[in-house]
C-alpha cells in the first residue's frame, strides 16, 4: 500500500471591511471525509512506529529484510533505553485509541490498524515478563544467534559498507556488556533465567570461544574481501568481540549460575503465570491459558497418532504409532548417511515445490531461496531449520538454514516437510510475497507475527501432500511426525511453563511422539524453556488457517478457488489471526453475495 498523505485545505478568503455595509464573503471550507481522515491518521501512526522501531533497533531492519537505513549502528539495549521505548509504544497506543477505526472504509488501512494495535498491546502485556532482565537464550532469540545472522547479512562490497560493518562489529562488545548489566539488575529484582538455559548457553559460548578467529562467522563473512579489510575484522574480533563473549561466559559460570532459578518454567519468576499467557498472546496472537493450550495439544496429538497408525498399517506393517515412530528414527534403513545427503534431499524437494507453485498460487515469489547448513558452533543448539529473509531489493536470496548436526542419527522422515515449511510453499513464499508487494505498508512487509507466519508454514506441510510433493510414504510419515512434533510442543510448552513439568518429562514425551533424534529434541526443549509461548504458535496458527479454509470450502462450494484463497491469505503480509478470520469471512460474504 502506498502511504496516503492527505492534505486538508481550509481556504478562507478574507476581505477587509471598509464600512458597515461591507459583508465578508463566506469562507470556503474543504474538509476531508472523516473516514478518509482516519485512514491518513492510521497510516501516519504506522509510519511513525516503523521509523521509530528501526531507529531504536537499527540492526533489525537488516535482519527483517527492510532497507538498512542506519548500517553503522547497533541499537541500545540498556534498561533506560528499553524503558523509553516502552513509554513511546504506550503513547502511540493512546494515539491509536483516539482514532475511530470502525469508520475505516479502506481494507488496507484496517489491516494496518489491526497489526499496529496487536504490536502495541502485546508489547504492553509482555512487559510483565521483564524478559530483558533474564534473556539467557541459546537459541535464535539470543544475542549470539543475532550476531551470527548479522555477520552474514551486513554489506561489505564497497569501502563505505566495509566501514559501516566495522562500526557495527566494534559496537558488539558494548552490546554484550549491556546484556550482563541487565542480568545483574534482574538478579536484584528477582528475575532469573533457568539453570537449564544457563547450562545450554555455556555450552554454546564454549563452542564459540573455541573457534579460531578465522572460523568465526565475522571472519568467514569477510573472506571474499580484500586483505586489509579482513585484517581489520580479525582485529575487532580478537580484541573486542571475543573478550566480551568471554566476559559474558565467565559471568554466567562464576556468578549467575549460582542464582539462576532451578525451575525451568517461567511461572517460577514474579508474575510468571501472567507472563506465560501474555507470551502466548504475543507469539500466537491468541489469548489462551496454559490449561487450554495443553488440552488442544493432547487432542491434536490423538488425531495425528490415528493418522500415523493408518499409514503405518498401509506401508510399514506396523499400526502402533509410537513403535513406528521409534523405528524410523533408529533403523539405519531410514537414516541419512551424511550431511551432504541431507542438503541434497532438501534441495530436490524444494525444486519440486517451486515448480508446482503456480498451480496452487496466483502470485508466486520472484526471490530465490538457498539451502545452507548452520555454522558448526551453532548447530548443536539450533532448531531443525530456520528461514532468514533475503533483502528487500532482491539482491540477496532467502536462506533456509538446515541443521545437519549428527546427520547419521537423523531420520529421513520429516526433512522434506521441514524444507517445505521453511522455503516453498512456507516461509520463503509468504515472506517474499509480502516483501515484493511494494504497495503494502512497511509494517506488513517487514514485521513478523508468529501465529500467522508459523501457522502458515505448518499449514503448508500438509498442503504439500495435496500438491503431490512428498516422495514416499516415509516422507508423508515425516509430515505427520512434524505435526505430532507441533502438537507435542503445545503439550510440553504449557506443561513446562504452567503445569510443573520437568525437563526429563518433557523430553520423554517429545522423544516418543516424533521422529527427531534425541539430541535435536533436547535442543528443542531448551528452546521452549528459554522462549515461553512461542512454540505454541505453530499448531494454533495452522489450525486457524485450516479452519478458515474449510469454512470457505463449505460455504462457497464450487465457487471456492484454492489459488484465490492462498492469495487472499498471503496478500497483506503477516496479520493477527483474528484479523485474518474477519478478512476471510468478508471474502466469503462477498462471493456468496455475487452468487445470489
Image: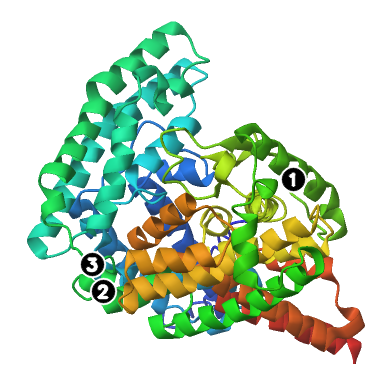
Residue 350, label in figure? 1
**Cβ atoms at labels 3 and 2 below 8 Å apart:** yes
Q: Is residue 405 left or right of residue 162?
A: right
User: Looking at the image, is 341 positioned above or below residue 350?
Assistant: above
559 horizontally vs 256: left or right: right
- Disc 2, disc 1: CB below 8 Å? no
Marks 2/1: CA distance? 41 Å
> Badge 1: few (under 14), some or many (20 or more) residues near its Cα, within 10 Å?
many
Q: How far apart are the two marked residues, 3 and 2, measured between alpha carbons?
A: 9 Å
Image vertical order of residue 298 relative to residue 527, above or below? below
Residue 367, given in percent of the width and then of the height, sits at 70, 41
**Image location of residue 379, percent across then percent down:** 46, 40
Q: What's the residue at 36%, 11% (across, down)?
A: 231
Q: Residue at x 75, y 66 (%)?
A: 566
Residue 29 percent across, percent down from the top left? 54, 75
| Residue at the limit of the structure toward the bottom, as seen here | 596
| Residue denoted by label 2 | 267
Q: Which residue is mark 3?
A: 263
Which colouring convention does the figure follow? rainbow
Residue at the farthest left position: 188
Task: Say if 220 sits above or below 576 in the image.
Answer: above
Question: Considering only order in the chain, which callout, 1 or 2, is on the residue closer to the N terminus?
Answer: 2
Residue ID at (52%, 76%): 27
Q: Residue at x 84, y 84 (%)?
A: 556
Amino acid at each position: 500500500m502506498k502511504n496516503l498523505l492527505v492534505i486538508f485545505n481550509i481556504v478562507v478568503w478574507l476581505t477587509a471591511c471598509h464600512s458597515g455595509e461591507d459583508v465578508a464573503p463566506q469562507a470556503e471550507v474543504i474538509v476531508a471525509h472523516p473516514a478518509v481522515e482516519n485512514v491518513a491518521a492510521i497510516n501516519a501512526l504506522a509510519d511513525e512506529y516503523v521509523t521509530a522501531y528501526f531507529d531504536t533497533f537499527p540492526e533489525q531492519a537488516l535482519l527483517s529484510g527492510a532497507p538498512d537505513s542506519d548500517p553503522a549502528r547497533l541499537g541500545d539495549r540498556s534498561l533506560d533505553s528499553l524503558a523509553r521505548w516502552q513509554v513511546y509504544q504506550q503513547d502511540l497506543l493512546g494515539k491509536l485509541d483516539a482514532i475511530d477505526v470502525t469508520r475505516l472504509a479502506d481494507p488496507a488501512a484496517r489491516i494496518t490498524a489491526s497489526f499496529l494495535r496487536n504490536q502495541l498491546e502485546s508489547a504492553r502485556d509482555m512487559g510483565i515478563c521483564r524478559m530483558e532482565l533474564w534473556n539467557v537464550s541459546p537459541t535464535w532469540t539470543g544475542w549470539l544467534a543475532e550476531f551470527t545472522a548479522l555477520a552474514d547479512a551486513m554489506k561489505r562490497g564497497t569501502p563505505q559498507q566495509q566501514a559501516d560493518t566495522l562500526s557495527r562489529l566494534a559496537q558488539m562488545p558494548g552490546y554484550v556488556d549491556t546484556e550482563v548489566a541487565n542480568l545483574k539488575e534482574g538478579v536484584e529484582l528477582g528475575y532469573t533465567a533457568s539453570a537449564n538455559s544457563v547450562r545450554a548457553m555455556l555450552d554454546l559460548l564454549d563452542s564459540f570461544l573455541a573457534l579460531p578467529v578465522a572460523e568465526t562467522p565475522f571472519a568467514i563473512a569477510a573472506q571474499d574481501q580484500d586483505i586489509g579489510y579482513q585484517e581489520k575484522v580479525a582485529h575487532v574480533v580478537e580484541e573486542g568481540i571475543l573478550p566480551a563473549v568471554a566476559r559474558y561466559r565467565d559471568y554466567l559460570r562464576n556468578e549467575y549460575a549460582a542464582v539462576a532459578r532451578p525451575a525451568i518454567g517461567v511461572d517460577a519468576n514474579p508474575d510468571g503465570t501472567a507472563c506465560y499467557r501474555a507470551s502466548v498472546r504475543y507469539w500466537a496472537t491468541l489469548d489462551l491459558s496454559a490449561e487450554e493450550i495443553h488440552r488442544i495439544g493432547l487432542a491434536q496429538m490423538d488425531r495425528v497418532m490415528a493418522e500415523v497408525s493408518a499409514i503405518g498399517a498401509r506401508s510399514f506393517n506396523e499400526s502402533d504409532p509410537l513403535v513406528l515412530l521409534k523405528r524410523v528414527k533408529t533403523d539405519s534403513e531410514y537414516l541419512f548417511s551424511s550431511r551432504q545427503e541431507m542438503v541434497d534431499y532438501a534441495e530436490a524437494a524444494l525444486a519440486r515445490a517451486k515448480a508446482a507453485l503456480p498451480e496452487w498460487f496466483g502470485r508466486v515469489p520472484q526471490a530465490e531461496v538457498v539451502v545452507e547448513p548452520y555454522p558448526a558452533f551453532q548447530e548443536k543448539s539450533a532448531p531443525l531449520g530456520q528461514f532468514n529473509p533475503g533483502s528487500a531489493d532482491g539482491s540477496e536470496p532467502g536462506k533456509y538454514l538446515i541443521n545437519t548436526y549428527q546427520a547419521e542419527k537423523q531420520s529421513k522422515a520429516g526433512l522434506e516437510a521441514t524444507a517445505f515449511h521453511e522455503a516453498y510453499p512456507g516461509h520463503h513464499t509468504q515472506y517474499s510475497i509480502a516483501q515484493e508487494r511494494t504497495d503494502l505498508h512497511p509494517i506488513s512487509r517487514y514485521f513478523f507475527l508468529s501465529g500467522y507466519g508459523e501457522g502458515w508454514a505448518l499449514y503448508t506441510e500438509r498442503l504439500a501432500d495435496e500438491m503431490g510433493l512428498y516422495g514416499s510414504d516415509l516422507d508423508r510419515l515425516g509430515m505427520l511426525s512434524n505435526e505430532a512434533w507441533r502438537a507435542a510442543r503445545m503439550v510440553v510448552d504449557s506443561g513446562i511453563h504452567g503445569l510443573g513439568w520437568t525437563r526429563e518429562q518433557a523430553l520423554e514425551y517429545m522423544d516418543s511422539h516424533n521422529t527427531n533424534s534425541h539430541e535435536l529434541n533436547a535442543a528443542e526443549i531448551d528452546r521452549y524453556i528459554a522462549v515461553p509461548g512461542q512454540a505454541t504458535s505453530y499448531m494454533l496458527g495452522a489450525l486457524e488457517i485450516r479452519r478458515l479454509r474449510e469454512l470457505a470450502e463449505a460455504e462457497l462450494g464450487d465457487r471456492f478457488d484454492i489459488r484465490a484463497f492462498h492469495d487472499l491469505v498471503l496478500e497483506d503480509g503477516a496479520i493477527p489471526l483474528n484479523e485474518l478470520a474477519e478478512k476471510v469471512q468478508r471474502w466469503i460474504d462477498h462471493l456468496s453475495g455475487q452468487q445470489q
